Image: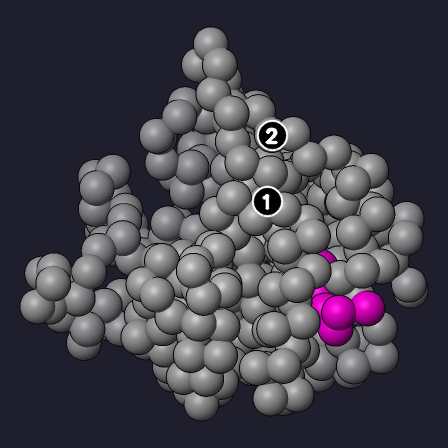
């Protein structure tokens, strides 16, 4: 096993780890236009991408997430960059690796491919798996220590991504879902319960499982969700990355209401519920991560 992966595993067993926060909203503050392809900035604006990583490592993050959420050929094709998958993802990993050095681990970020499988959509699962493997290979070649499959709604898609990550040679795979409240409790957009979402990705080989980017979930909701995740995780570590509340739009700007102080206050409760990795998703900033680092046991 890669020594850095082995150290990641042993450190995670010894103490909680702190992930970073949002990438997209941070890039928008640096000038990325809403709806533009942030992944292309790995090539066109690398200094600004590095700056986001530097801000998070200065805040105390143990894990830096690459700027590659929409890095599959399917998503990049919509921006005219479908043929640049390897170039974009390799650069994403290199930028994070350069900043992380020996101070943090790099998570190669893999988000949804943005479509639906046949017969509800036009995507062939076999082709999607190939796209995930292409992205995973480039991230690992660029220096990612582990791969983070995130913001999943369909367990079937998440399984393909986990399998592709493993086939590409990933020594550690994280897999997280976006949950929302339903009449019967927490569920994915596709209607899967926490247990139903986690079981197949665990069987596929995910090492760390959890949740991020919950729709209209409060921090207290995340504490309750964490307990459900831990109960369904079959002893695997759980990662939880809440949003900073729901986005509000005014005068062309997006803002979020949950403060760094509120995130810090939630950390002990998330850990008590069983989380082993905490961090932030949409709307969170280096200030949120700094506040969390101040109360996280080391």
Is disc 1 in contact with disc 2, using a CB cutoff of under 8 Å? yes
Residue drawn at (36%, 36%), measured in percent from left and top?
Answer: 37
In this picture, which residue range is highlighted in magenta? 272-281
Magenta residue check for 154? no
Image quadrant where residue 155 sits: bottom left
The stretch drawn in magenta includes residue 273:
yes
Residue picked out by circle 1? 243
Tell me which residue sits at (19%, 73%) in the image: 125
Which numbered disc covers residue 256?
A: 2
Left or right, 11 with respect to 192, comes to: right
Dominant secondary structure, magenta? loop
125 with respect to 164 (left or right): left
Residue drawn at the location 74% of the way across and 73% of the way down? 274
Could you give the CA–CA distance between mark 1 and mark 2, rounded to whole angstroms?
9 Å
User: In the rendered image of this protein, does residue 202 appear above or below residue 154?
Assistant: below
Residue 133 in view (yes/no): no
């Amino acid at each position: 096993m890669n020594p850095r992966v082995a150290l990641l595993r042993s450190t995670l067993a010894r103490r909680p780890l702190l992930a970073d926060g949002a990438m997209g909203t941070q890039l928008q503050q640096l000038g990325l236009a809403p709806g533009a392809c942030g992944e292309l900035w790995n090539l066109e604006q690398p200094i600004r991408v590095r700056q986001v990583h530097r801000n998070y490592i200065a805040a105390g993050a143990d894990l830096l997430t690459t700027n590659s959420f929409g890095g599959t050929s399917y998503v990049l094709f919509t921006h005219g960059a479908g043929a640049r998958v390897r170039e974009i993802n390799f650069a994403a990993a290199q930028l994070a690796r350069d900043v992380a050095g020996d101070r943090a681990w790099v998570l190669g970020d893999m988000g949804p491919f943005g479509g639906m499988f046949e017969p509800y959509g036009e995507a062939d699962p076999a082709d999607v798996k190939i796209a995930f493997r292409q992205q995973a290979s480039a991230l690992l070649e660029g220096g990612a220590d582990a791969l983070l499959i995130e913001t999943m709604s369909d367990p079937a898609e998440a399984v393909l991504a986990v399998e592709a990550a493993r086939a590409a040679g990933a020594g550690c795979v994280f897999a997280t879902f976006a949950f929302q409240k339903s009449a019967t409790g927490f569920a994915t957009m596709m209607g899967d319960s926490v247990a139903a979402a986690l079981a197949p990705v665990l069987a596929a080989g995910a090492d760390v499982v959890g949740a991020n980017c919950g729709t209209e979930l409060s921090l207290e909701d995340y504490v309750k969700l964490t307990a459900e995740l831990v109960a369904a995780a079959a002893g695997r570590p759980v990662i939880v990355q809440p949003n900073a509340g729901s986005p509000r739009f005014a005068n062309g700007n997006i803002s979020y209401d949950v403060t760094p102080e509120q995130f810090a206050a939630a950390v002990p409760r998330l850990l008590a519920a069983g989380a082993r990795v905490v961090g932030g998703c949409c709307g969170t900033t280096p200030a949120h991560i700094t506040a969390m680092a101040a109360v996280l046991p080391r």
